Amino acid sequence: MKKRKTVLSQEIIVAIVLVALYMIFRTISSDFGKYTTFLSMMDISYYYALMAIGVAFPLITGGVDLSIGTGMICYALAGGFLIRNYNCPTGLAILVSIMFGVLIGLCNGILISVLGLPPFLATLCNCMITRGLGSVVTGSFAVPWPTAKQANGWFHSIFKITTANKTKIPLGLVWIILLMLLMQFILAHTRFGRYTIAIGSNKEAAILSGINVKFYHVMVYMVSGLFAGLASIAYAAVIKTVQPGTGAGMELDAIGGAIVGGVSASGGYGTIYGTVIGAYVIIFLKQGLPYIGFNANMQQIITGLVLIGAVCIDIIKRKVIK
């Protein structure tokens, strides 16, 4: 129970920080408070939040998934390539992109649980593979997905709809909230979720208690891959042209968001609620700092300091629990 209360307190703190960041940026810069800025920030937030939800599961087991950033780009390139070169229906291309993510997640899980590779090394290898694979599949050419105005560009309406009076509604935020609730329920109230936490808390004890650790290790990486695949669709809906060879570093923002939101850097506990809130803290920093005059280098420094603070809080939590 102590763990739950400690994590919950961090969720509340991070939520307060999120509101405070919004108020600070809006007070300093009137442009930050504009609805168009909010829409732009929401567009970007969807694929970061989806990656963060997925990667929270490997993190809770004490692992990590470094392949989700370049993987997301690779899956988006694959789906867009099918549409552009083979007139593939958009729905089928979306399914292929998502299943591609699940397949890479399966590969990560097998490398880690069956072959015994450290999660950092296994997922780093697949990070490099997916980065190169996207370029190979597309011949190193950028790939555009259908625009919202084209007949097969209906998938844009999953994330943003336009009303009769031309007002744009960020529908994607609703899906993020629903997925957050679903995955939190799975983490807290299903065997899969309980075993995920148990593995991260004490792997040896989990094995001795009869948990099939290898199986659940594979499953958590497949979940991470699944959400990277979903993120690739959100990315294609926002970015007009998907560029091969990109995506490196984006996984760090997703992982950072999960850690800021209370997921332990060494595994064992965390919530999806906190993960999503933490992801939005990182997004607010990335999008808000330029409005108050900070350049890209300062953005990196400040974001890094925030992550250090989150890890320090995690260390303090563990000492208090002990």
Image (cartoon, rainbow, N blue to C red):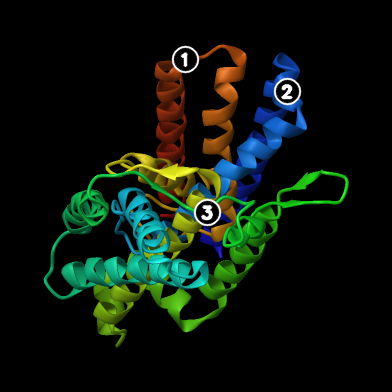
2 or 3: tag closer to the N-terminus = 2
Q: From the viewer's perspective, tell me whether residue 102 is left or right of residue 129.
A: right
Tell me the residue at 49%/70% (across/down): 89
Q: Amino acid at mark 2?
A: Arg
3 or 1: tag closer to the N-terminus = 3
Residue 180, located in which quarter of the rendered image? bottom right
Residue 185, located in which quarter of the rendered image? bottom right
Q: From the viewer's perspective, tell me whether residue 187 is left or right of residue 185.
A: left
* Tag of residue 295: 1
Q: Residues within 10 Å of mark 2 (few under 14, many from 20)?
A: some
Residue 223 shows in this picture: no
Tell me the residue at 56%/29% (across/down): 287
Q: From the viewer's perspective, tell me whether residue 138 is left or right of residue 186.
A: left
Q: Nearer the viewer, mark 2 or mark 3?
A: 3
Residue occupied by mark 3: 146
Q: Nearer the viewer, residue 169 or 48?
A: 169
Q: Residues within 10 Å of mark 3 (few under 14, many from 20)?
A: many
Q: Amino acid at mark 3?
A: Pro
Residue 5, located in which quarter of the rendered image? bottom right
Residue 161 shows in this picture: yes
* Tag of residue 89: none
> How far separated are the C-alphas under marks 2 and 3?
34 Å
Tell me the residue at 13%/68% (across/down): 116
* Tag of residue 26: 2
